[in-house]
């Protein structure tokens, strides 16, 4: 939504459009994105629902809604949205990790492992995401996943992987360790994991 320039002015224009035609697809998409960026998640969901009512296979909405439902504590809906994002054919391989976290927190451990097992074959075995999948499937020693994160050449991906490492610490009861890792990335912008890290820090 940053390309819209003057967001408040753009929002006013978009709201005027939907007041004339509440099913205007592009106005609803942009409003959903603006409200998501503002952290006004109830309104973001309202507009995303309008988008999906018009085009139920609009796959770009699924992971954003998954993040929002996670923040709202609606883990079943969050998991469903991440599963929809996976089923849409997206090549973004962090969605199975988010679905796995949701299922784990819901106590559905078999589903948590299944969503990773069903997708791990698509990963580059030399990548940090692959090691994170392996760690989530067998969370014993974090040595190899920590090494993979350290060696990750993409700075943003390295910090995104830190979120998943921290979440496994949090799930296993190592809350102080998790908080240290989350605090490293909670101020960053540009990826959902950073927004979720800030949420987890506030929640603690």
Image (cartoon, rainbow, N blue to C red):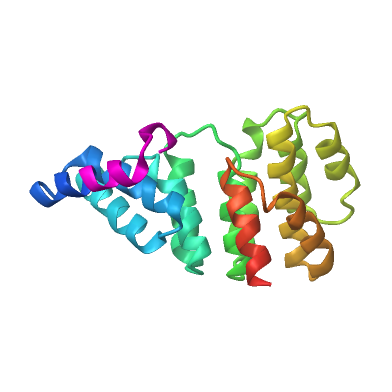
Q: Residue at x 23, y 52 (%)?
A: 50
From the top left corner, tell me how far across and down residue 190 is, in percent: 58, 40
Of 197 and 103, nearer the camera is 197
Q: Is residue 145 left or right of residue 136?
A: right
Q: Residue furthest left?
A: 20
- The quarter in which the C terminus is drawn is bottom right
Q: Is residue 138 left or right of residue 84?
A: right
Q: Is residue 23 above or below residue 26?
A: below
Of 9 and 167, nearer the camera is 9
Of 143 and 187, nearer the camera is 187
Q: Is residue 124 left or right of residue 86?
A: right
From the top left corner, tell me how far across and down residue 68 is, in percent: 46, 58
Q: Is residue 76 left or right of residue 121?
A: left
| Residue 118, quarter of picture | top right
Reply yes or no: does residue 50 show up in magenta.
no
Of 183 and 164, nearer the camera is 183
From the top left corner, tell me how far across and down residue 127 is, in percent: 75, 31
- The quarter in which the N terminus is drawn is top left
Q: Residue at x 40, y 60 (%)?
A: 40
Q: Residue at x 79, y 55 (%)?
A: 181
Reply yes or no: does residue 11 show up in magenta.
yes
Magenta portion: prevailing SS class: helix
Q: Is residue 46 above or below residue 84?
A: below
Q: Residue at x 65, y 64 (%)?
A: 200
- Image mark count: 0
From the top left corner, tell me how far across and down residue 123 is, in percent: 66, 31
Which segment is the magenta one? 1-13
């Amino acid at each position: 939504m940053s390309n819209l320039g003057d967001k408040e002015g753009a929002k006013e224009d978009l709201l005027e459009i939907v007041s004339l035609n509440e099913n205007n697809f592009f106005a609803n998409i942009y409003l959903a994105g603006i409200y998501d960026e503002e952290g006004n998640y109830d309104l973001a969901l309202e507009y995303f629902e309008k988008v999906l009512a018009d085009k139920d296979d609009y796959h770009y909405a699924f992971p954003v809604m998954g993040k929002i439902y996670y923040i709202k504590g609606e883990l079943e809906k969050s998991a469903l949205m991440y599963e929809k994002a996976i089923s849409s054919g997206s090549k973004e391989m962090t969605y199975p990790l988010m679905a796995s976290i949701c299922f784990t927190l819901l106590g559905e451990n078999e589903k948590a492992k299944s969503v990773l097992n069903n997708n791990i074959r698509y990963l580059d075995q030399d990548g940090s995401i692959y090691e994170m999948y392996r760690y989530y499937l067998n969370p014993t020693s974090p040595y190899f996943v920590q090494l993979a994160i350290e060696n990750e050449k993409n700075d943003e991906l390295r910090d995104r992987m830190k979120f998943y490492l921290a979440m496994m610490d949090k799930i296993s009861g190592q809350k102080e360790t998790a908080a240290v890792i989350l605090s490293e990335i909670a101020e960053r912008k540009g990826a959902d994991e950073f927004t979720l890290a800030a949420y987890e820090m506030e929640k603690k």
